[in-house]
Image (cartoon, rainbow, N blue to C red):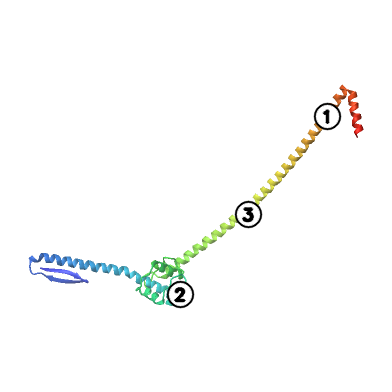
């Protein structure tokens, strides 16, 4: 019985002697399946690890565009608290040293790019280039400038409204102060008139009482007047 297996992409022939070797054939197929599965897992892992090399290539691309040496990039990162030697930068660019997320964000920062730029930045030689990124940044800069102008215009408008409202407020406060002063002065005049009226009424009452007394007892009134004159 002839059997076929695949190893590293190559077909292999295996011949059994008789149908009685079915159990051995089953074991052979199971071993071959495990072998292929192991190879597939390794291939998948290699595919994912390839991204580390891609990120390293992006770091090298950004560094060379800025005419930095690996030591220059290490110095830039040290200012952010990442103490990386030139040899570490070389290993990262070659994909031999895993790149931490915080380091990727720091590299983007020192290069003046958004935090996640290393993850979507194209590499030279790919269908898309950095020209797309530059155009995107220019568009964003234009949008930021337009927003700034709108904010400036809005601020000027609101500043004029604020000045007008403040003037109106001060005028209203001044008018209120004047009205309060007039009210206080008017109330003071009315109080003075009321007090004078009370004094006049009291004096009139005294005169009327004196007249009634004089009509009732003229001698007593005359005597009281003489006593008052003597005291004076």
Q: Nearer the viewer, mark 3 or mark 1?
A: 1
Instruction: For label 1, count other residues whose C-alpha is less than 10 Å away and answer few (under 14), some (14-19) or many (20+).
Output: few
Residue 5, given in percent of the width and then of the height, sits at 17, 69
Q: Identify the residue under disc 1.
A: 206
SS type, badge 2 = helix
Q: Do the residues labelled 3 and 2 touch (CB within 8 Å)?
A: no
Q: State left or right for residue 50 relative to residue 37.
A: right
Of marks 3 and 2, which one's residue comes earlier in the chain? Answer: 2
Distance in Å between CA atoms under marks 3 and 2: 51 Å
Distance in Å between CA atoms under marks 3 and 1: 65 Å
Q: Identify the residue under disc 3.
A: 163
Q: Identify the residue under disc 2.
A: 75
Q: Looking at the image, which is closer to me, 88 or 70?
A: 88
Q: Do the residues labelled 3 and 1 touch (CB within 8 Å)?
A: no
SS type, badge 3 = helix
Of marks 1 and 2, which one's residue comes earlier in the chain? Answer: 2
Q: In which quarter of the image is residue 29?
A: bottom left
């Amino acid at each position: 019985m002839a059997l076929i297996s695949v190893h590293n992409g190559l077909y292999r022939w295996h011949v059994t002697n008789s149908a009685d070797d079915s159990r051995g054939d089953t074991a052979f197929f199971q071993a071959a399946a495990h072998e292929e599965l192991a190879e597939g897992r390794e291939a998948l892992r290699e595919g994912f690890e390839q991204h580390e090399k891609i990120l390293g290539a992006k770091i090298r691309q950004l560094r060379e565009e800025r005419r930095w040496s690996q030591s220059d990039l290490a110095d830039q990162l040290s200012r952010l608290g990442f103490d990386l030697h030139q040899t570490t930068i070389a290993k990262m660019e070659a994909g031999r040293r895993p790149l931490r997320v915080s380091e990727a964000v720091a590299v983007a920062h020192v290069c003046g790019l958004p935090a996640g730029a290393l993850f979507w930045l194209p590499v030279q030689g790919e269908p898309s280039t950095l020209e797309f990124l530059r155009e995107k940044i220019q568009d964003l800069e234009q949008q930021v400038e337009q927003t700034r102008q709108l904010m400036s215009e809005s601020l000027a408008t609101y500043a004029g409204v604020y000045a007008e409202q403040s003037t109106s407020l001060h005028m209203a406060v001044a008018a209120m102060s004047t009205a309060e002063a007039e009210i206080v002065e008017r109330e003071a005049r009315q109080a003075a008139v009321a007090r004078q009226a009370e004094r006049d009424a009291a004096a009139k009452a005294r005169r009327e009482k004196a007249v009634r007394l004089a009509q009732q007892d003229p001698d007593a009134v005359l005597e009281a007047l003489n006593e008052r004159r003597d005291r004076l």
